[in-house]
Amino acid sequence: MRTEPDWRSSPHSADLTNYDFADCAQEFVRRSPDYRSDYAATHAQIATQKTEPSPEMEGLARRWGMTFPLRSNT
């Protein structure tokens, strides 16, 4: 069973010193069961409907007040 790293441990607390507010907010949302469910449903919809991922991921980002770096088509 995979477990999340303990942010209080020495190796991980050093990584956190470089986090800004946006990084902390993203980590907080990423651990939300509701967000994880929405993220999985969005990916399932992309796979099932074979739709372009960008609009679906942009919708997910809007719902959660986040941005995802997307690759350009060029």
Image (cartoon, grey):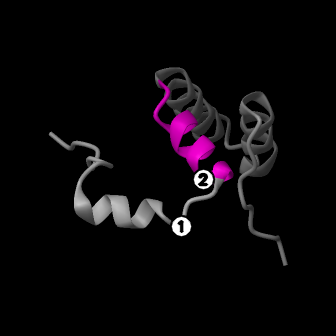
Is 54 part of what is drawn in magenta?
no
What residue appears at the point 82 percent right and 44 percent down from the top-left corner?
A: 55
Boundaries of the magenta span: 21-32
Position of 23 with respect to 72 (left or right) is left
Task: Residue type at mark 1: give it.
Answer: Asn
Q: What residue is disc 2 on?
A: 23
Magenta stretch prevailing secondary structure: helix
Height in image: 23 above or below 66? below
Q: What residue occupies the far top of the structure in this picture?
A: 34
Q: Where, by quadrant of the figure, is residue 69 drawn?
A: bottom right
Q: Are marks 1 and 2 in contact (CB under 8 Å)?
A: yes
Crowding near the residue tagged with mark 1, few <14, some 14–19, many ≥20 C-alpha atoms within 10 Å: few
What residue appears at the point 50 percent right and 30 percent down from the top-left corner?
A: 36
Q: Earlier in the sequence, mark 1 or mark 2?
A: 1
The Cα atoms of the two marked residues, 1 and 2, are separated by: 9 Å
Is 28 part of what is drawn in magenta?
yes
What residue appears at the point 67 percent right and 50 percent down from the top-left corner?
A: 22
- Rendered location of residue 37, percent (x, y): 51, 25
User: Closer to the camera, 6 or 69?
Assistant: 6
- Rendered location of residue 35, percent (x, y): 56, 28
Task: Residue type at mark 2: give it.
Answer: Asp
User: Closer to the camera, 24 or 72?
Assistant: 24
Position of 25 with respect to 65 (left or right) is left
What residue appears at the point 54 percent right and 21 percent down from the top-left corner?
A: 34
Q: Disc 1 or disc 2, which is closer to the eye?
A: 1
Q: What residue is disc 1 on?
A: 18
